[in-house]
Each structure stands twice: as C-alpha cells, then as structure tokens.
Amino acid sequence: MKFSELQLNDQVLDALEAMRFDECTPIQEKSIPVILEGRDLIAVAQTGTGKTAAYLLPVLNKLSEGNHPEDAINCIVMSPTRELAQQIDQQMEGFSYFMPVSSVAVYGGNDGVLFEQQKKGLMLGADVVIATPGRLIAHLSLGYVDLSRVSYFILDEADRMLDMGFYDDIMQIVKYLPKERQTIMFSATMPAKIQQLANTILNNPAEVKLAVSRPAEKIVQAAYVCYENQKLGIIRSLFAEQTPERVIIFASSKLKVKEVTKALKMMKLNVGEMHSDLEQAQREEVMHEFKAGRVNILVATDIVARGIDIDDIRLVINYDVPHDSEDYVHRIGRTARANNDGVALTFINEKEQSNFKQIENFLEKEIYKIAVPEELGEAPEYKPRSYDGRGKRNFRSSKGGRNTNKGAGNKKKGGTPKGRNGRAPEKK
C-alpha cells in the first residue's frame, strides 16, 4: 500500500515525498489507520520494520491540523535509551519539515547546557517531547513541566524499557498525564509483563502483531557446542590469526561483558564495552568510537541489540544463547545489512542447548555446528532434549569436539566457518 492511500493530509504527504517514502511497511499499513481513528494501540513489531513512522506520522497528521493548544506539550514519546531517542528525534525533524510542529528530545548526559535546552523546550510547551524515563522524571521533579494537556502518550520498545527496570518510572510519569488521552505502545515481544502494562495504561486497545521475520538469508549462521569455560578460548582462537573488524559480541550480563572485554584487551585487541554500569556520556563515546572504526570489537549486553544504526557489522557473536527467538533475530540482525554479507556465531553450553533448539525450531532449520578447537579439550555433544533443566547432564562428552557434531570442520581466518570441503556452510 502507498502512503497516499491512507488518510494523511497534504503536509505529511509532502514530507514523505521529500524523503522519498512511497510504500508503507506492513506495520505502518496496519497501525496508521488505527491511530488516526483515535484508538489506543498495542503493536508488536521488530526493530527495522518502520515502527517509528508508524506512530509519528498519524500523530503529526493530527497535530498539524491545528486543534491542539500551541503552548502545551501535546505528545510524549518514551524511549528506553538515549541512542533510540536521538534516532526518533532525527526522524521527527524530517517528517515535520513542512508542518508547524515543534519538538524537543530529553535524555541524559553530563552537559549542563543540554539540560537547560531541554528545560526551555519543556517549559515553552513543545508539541512533541521524545524522552528517556529517567531524564523526564528529573525535569518533572523540578516542578516546571506540565503534562496535563498531553493528548498522545507513546511507548517505543516497551519490552526493552521493562527489561531495563523502567516500570516504576513509566507508572510515575503516567500519574502526571490526563486520563483522557490516546496511548500507543510498541514492543518487539509480548511477554506477560508487557500484557500487564498494557492492561494498566491502555483503554480497550486495538492489537497489531506482525510475525517475527526470519534472519536475512545473507547471514551465515553457525554455532559452537561447548562448556562455559571454553567460550573465551574459542574467541581467542577465532581472533588469533587475524585482527577482526566490525564485530559485536553479545553477552547476557554486564559481568560477562566485563570479563570478555578484559580477556580481549589482554590479547591487545581494540575493544570497547557497552553495559548499564557506564554513564551515558561513556556509552555515547564508546558507540562513537565504534561507528568511526577506532574500536573494532564491541562487547555488549542486549542494551544495544535494538536501535543500533550501523550497517557494516561483519560478525556477531552470541557469547550466550539469547533468551528467545526474537532476541536471537534482533542480535544477529546487526550484521548483513545494507546489502553486506555477515556471519553470526553462537556459543552453546550444556544448559543452553534446549533454549538453542527452540531457536532452531523457530528458524525451521538446524544451525551448522563447528568443532571446538582440539587444544580446548573435550566438548559436549549436542543433545538438547537430554538436559533435564535441573542442572543434571545426561549426555556424553567427546574428545576435542571431533565427533561432537556432524560435518564439523575447520575455521577460515577471521572467524567465518568452513565445512569439510573447505567451503562456507550452505546458506539455507
């Protein structure tokens, strides 16, 4: 469907034409009419599906019609991270180019000048405020922010906000909002806690849910079945012969991020780390250095799995198996973007086998398994059903990983997996 077929006004369509936006994505086609109707909405869609435009365009359409107070904050967009808030703000600038709609982005940082700019925008009543929860609460606590006339309350990446511990902050912000408002919630997944939040703050919402798409065909996916204490050794072997470029390593906890980063620094590799213990300014600096190519390897928690806008990632390593299929798709989706090829490797310890098997079931294919390097010793067999979930191991170990997996073979320099015939595994 084309944007011109939706009930969007000329100002919005002019902006879309200027930005060369013509065809709607599925989430835009399904969400925009619902939001234009004025209904509350909960939408489940992955990052990269065009969800930002799916909520900004209909809200801008309404604001540009001039039926809202000029000196009030009319729309709040909540974002889990500063990086995503900045991206939303950039899209906002483009979409609102032909409209008399003002906006301000409100996020953390150590810059006092930035805080004053945000304060000014909030006090003057910017039409759209794009904010991280903590920084908006900081401004609210100082008493000069009036949210009593907000018409639209939008939560982007709601599941990530809850994962980061922002539930109480969101509920505190809701107390400042009028009951008569339109609430729109976008989430990449729909766990029980998201459903609970929706039941609390939404009023009879429409639901739009897009099936989680499979990873891009260009991504070569492979895995190592190993013991937990072999994971660092596998990384050392991958990077021993050739300095890697444009690599993201995802770990399940900040403790593991720090551990892996320390090990890679001891290998004299150019590595940066990204986790919640870092100040916002530090996170921004690390991301800037990675984007600029001055840092080759980024070790991170899932805080950067979504919303990161880097097109030339060569390799993604899952140091731990992601919690679910959606997280797996989000993580490895950082590679093979903008027509580039990419490789995604996952390390699977004994306890993670059943979880990884669920991911394979979702992908409807078996992921190629690479033998653990001989020097690292024994490796477990891949028998996900034999792990009973209570810490008991019911499978055998094989020496050096040689008989661990069917078709396991050698590695190519730089980390791309190879089969017995010397070629990369077939992309299915």
Image (cartoon, rainbow, N blue to C red):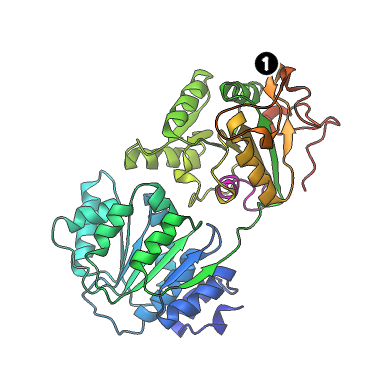
| Residue 370 against residue 98 in the figure, above or below | above
Toward the left, the furthest residue is 143
What residue type is disc 1 on? Gly
Q: Is residue 179 left or right of residue 16?
A: left
Residue 17 image offset from top left, x and y in percent: 53, 76
Residue 285 image offset from top left, x and y in percent: 39, 39
| Residue 81 against residue 153 in the figure, above or below | above
Q: Quadrant of residue 348?
A: top right
Residue under the point 86% across and 31% down: 421
Q: Quadrant of residue 145?
A: bottom left
Q: Is residue 225 left or right of residue 197?
A: right
Is residue 89 among the parts visible in the rendering? no
Residue 311 image offset from top left, x and y in percent: 57, 49
Q: Quadrant of the N terminus?
A: bottom right
Q: Secondary structure at mark 1?
A: loop
Q: Which residues are magenta?
A: 328-340
Is residue 386 among the parts visible in the rendering? yes
The residue that mark 1 highlights is 377
Q: Magenta stretch containing residue 351, yes or no?
A: no
Q: Magenta stretch containing residue 338, yes or no?
A: yes
Residue under the point 21% across and 52% down: 138
| Residue 370 against residue 233 in the figure, above or below | below
Q: For this rendering, which residue is in front, 200 or 394?
A: 394
Residue under the point 47% across and 29% down: 256
Residue under the point 56% across and 75% down: 29
Q: Is residue 391 left or right of residue 125?
A: right
Per the picture, the main secondary structure of the magenta-coloured stretch is: loop
